Amino acid sequence: MFVTHSVDEALVLGNKVVVMTKRPGRIREAVDFDLPRPRDITSPEFNDAKRHILSLIREESTRLAQAS
């Protein structure tokens, strides 16, 4: 297990990225990610996964802002 706040770092180093909720810290979604190494950060697969993870993070941030 490796904890990071960098989506790029998570996708370069990991095979599964887990997006958490803020509080309480629960699993929002686990994204399996299995590209060959070294990973090409310009590939469509890498960028599709990055967009998906960033959308999960944005949705969580929006949900929290609306709840305040």
Image (cartoon, rainbow, N blue to C red):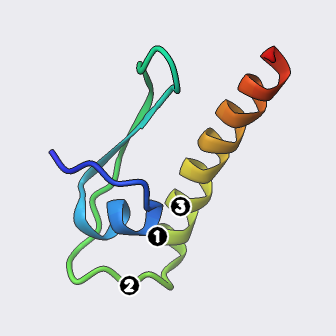
Rendered residue at 27%/59% (across/down): 34
Three-letter amino acid code of the residue under disc 2: Asp
Rendered residue at 20%/78% (across/down): 37
Answer whether labels 2 and 1 touch (C-beta < 8 Å).
yes
Answer whether labels 3 and 1 touch (C-beta < 8 Å).
yes
**Label for residue 10?**
none
- Give the image location of residue 11, x and y in percent: 36, 63
Q: CA distance from mark 2 to mark 3?
A: 12 Å
**What element does badge 3 sit on?**
helix
Q: Please give left or right for residue 26 compared with residue 55 in the image.
A: left
Q: CA distance from mark 2 to mark 1?
A: 7 Å
Three-letter amino acid code of the residue under disc 3: Lys
Answer whether labels 2 and 3 touch (C-beta < 8 Å).
no
Three-letter amino acid code of the residue under disc 1: Phe
Q: As displayed, is residue 32 above or below residue 6?
A: above
Circle 3 crowding by C-alpha within 10 Å: few under 14, some 14–19, many from 20: some
The residue under label 3 is: 50
Circle 1 crowding by C-alpha within 10 Å: few under 14, some 14–19, many from 20: some
Closer to us: 66 or 58: 66
Circle 2 crowding by C-alpha within 10 Å: few under 14, some 14–19, many from 20: few
Of mark 2 and mark 1, the one earlier in the sequence is 2
Rendered residue at 84%/22% (across/down): 66
**What element does badge 1 sit on?**
helix
- Give the image location of residue 62, x and y in percent: 77, 33
Q: CA distance from mark 3 to mark 1?
A: 6 Å
- Give the image location of residue 51, x and y in percent: 62, 58
The residue under label 2 is: 40
- Give the image location of residue 50, x and y in percent: 53, 61
Snapshot quadrant of residue 32:
top left
The residue under label 1 is: 46
